[in-house]
Image (cartoon, rainbow, N blue to C red):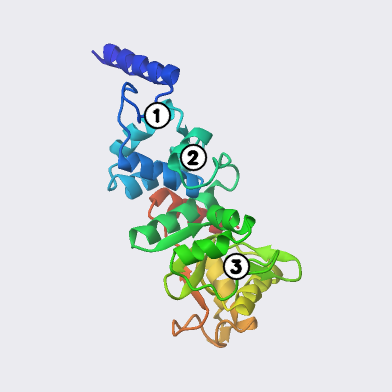
Amino acid sequence: MGTRKTGVYRERAERRRRTQGTGEARGDGWQRTEADEQLLRLATRYSTLTLHQAAYACWGGRIEAARRRVRLMAEAGLLRRSAEVRWAGTVVWTTERGARVAGVGLGAPHPPGERLLHRLALADVGLRLEAQGHTVLAEREVRTAEAAPGRAAELLADLGVPVVHEGTRGEPLLAVRAGARAVHWPDLLLVLPGEGVAAVEVELTAKTPGSLRQILRAYGQARRRVLYLATAPVVRQLQGRPGPAGQWTDGVAQDVGLLPSGGPDPGTGGLLRVRPFAAVDPAVDRQAARHAQRR
């Protein structure tokens, strides 16, 4: 019985590969659901998702439901999937065809490479914020909007965000200027209707103090609120730590004036917030902790 069932599955999969049915037209052999289309949108916007993240965002945490639907969409040429990185399990991203079906104005993302952990960590934070009812722009959306003249201002207006200036040629609205020529792209943007936007930075590995200082100064000069979600070493680098005699050793954020001297983030206002990184996907959470310890 098991061999016969496996043969039926393979026959159906081969039929879907031959007909390239997208689940949209009669005769495709399956019907695409709203949850399927939501996954295509998320996998295009955030570039890569784990199966756990897909289940959390689209199927109420039901892993097997996510596994079945991912298999159908992979066989139909809408998704690519890989289980080559052991700690991550199955990860998925859209094909060009899947990105067109997603309809979010982005092409297919590049396959995940050595920055897989960071990509998945960003997706995890974005999915959690969206589940809480927030509107989030992924870095791909920010870069695409900034690339077209006037598009960033139009996007903010559509989202109910007041635009202070329309921007000049080469001057970003969603990113921040970091020095005379460089632009710093936020990992995520949190939209605050009627107020503006706040940057979200997910830092798993400590940067050089000079690099971190430049980014923080860029946010300070732009008067852009920013939330850092970071592993323990980066939290210490940002806001300092207690010294051996109990006195507080300031971090980079105090050096540039984004946190008051003499203690950690007090949570009383200002442009900068520093919080520990935690992921919905346990595998991403564990790997982030391991990565921070190795570094």
Residue 241 seen: yes
Residue at x-position 49% and y-position 75%: 273
* Residue 173 numbered mark, or none: 3
Q: Is residue 10 above or below residue 244?
A: above
Q: Is residue 13 left or right of residue 177?
A: left
Tag 2 and tag 1, C-beta contact below 8 Å: no
Q: Residue furthest left?
A: 1
The span from disc 1 to disc 3 (Cα, nearest Å) is 37 Å
The span from disc 2 to disc 1 (Cα, nearest Å) is 12 Å
Secondary structure of the residue carrying tag 1 is loop
Q: Amino acid at mark 2?
A: Ala
Q: Residue furthest right?
A: 180
Q: Which one is earlier in the sequence, the residue at label 2 or at label 3? A: 2
* Residue 99 numbered mark, or none: 2
Residue at x-position 41% and y-position 62%: 135
Q: Which one is earlier in the sequence, the residue at label 1 or at label 3? A: 1
Q: Amino acid at mark 1?
A: Thr
Q: Would you call the spot at circle 1 few (<14 residues within 10 Å), some (14-19), or many (20 or more)?
A: many
Secondary structure of the residue carrying tag 3 is loop
Residue at x-position 43% and y-position 20%: 17
